[in-house]
Image: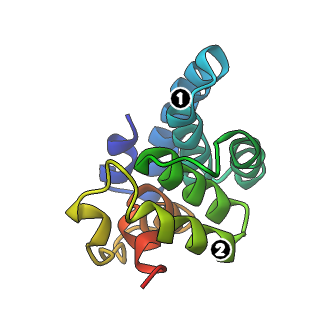
Amino acid sequence: MKERAFAAATKDARRKQAGASFEAYHRLHQAKQGYYPGINAATMALCAGDTVTARKIAALLTATVPQDSEEYWPLATLAEALLIVDRGGEAKDVLLKARTARGADDGAKRPPFSSSAVSPPCSTAISTCSSMRSIRAMSR
């Protein structure tokens, strides 16, 4: 779902696709309370221009995703949520741990990609949240 938002050709189309993606992920998160649909809902809200909702969901995740996890994906999710709520220093610390956590692969060490063709706020979400490569670069 989120890939459609990232691939859309215009800013308006990206926001529309991000809004639709947010709705789907948000419904799933409300039903299942998992961190995966939660962080995707937060990121898609950010891409759709709804910073308040993005930060509200991300704040919930920062309180519920275990910071002492030994697994990559919960830690990567926590770092992404911390970035959305403007806690970059904490995100960096979590990413340092995530790079060596179970489930981390060589992709966790790749440099960030360029998102210059994408308009903010979605470019921020792509480069710092959705792509994890960018926020992983913070730990270097």
Looking at the picture, which amino acid does disc 1 mark?
Tyr
The numbered disc on residue 41 is none
Measured along the vertical axis of the image, is residue 33 above or below residue 10? above
Measured along the vertical axis of the image, is residue 44 above or below residue 9? above
131 displayed left or right of 62:
left
**Quadrant in which the N terminus appears:** top left
**Tag 1, which secondary structure?**
helix
Q: Position of residue 43 (x, y in %)?
A: 55, 49
Q: Nearer the viewer, residue 80 or 27?
A: 80
Give me the residue at 76% from left, 45% from top.
Answer: 63
Give me the residue at 40% from left, 41% from top.
Answer: 2
Give me the residue at 24% from left, 58% from top.
Answer: 105
Name the residue furthest left.
Answer: 106
**Quadrant in which the C terminus appears:** bottom left
Give me the residue at 41% from left, 51% from top.
Answer: 72
Q: Which residue is mark 1?
A: 25
Label 1 Cα neighbours within 10 Å, binned few <14 / some 14-19 / many ≥20: many
Count of numbered badges drawn on the protein: 2
Badge nearest the viewer, 1 or 2: 2
Name the residue furthest bottom.
Answer: 140
Q: Position of residue 120 (x, y in %)?
A: 54, 68
Q: Which residue is mark 2?
A: 88
Looking at the picture, which amino acid does disc 2 mark?
Gly
**Tag 2, which secondary structure?**
helix
Q: Nearer the viewer, residue 94 or 129?
A: 94
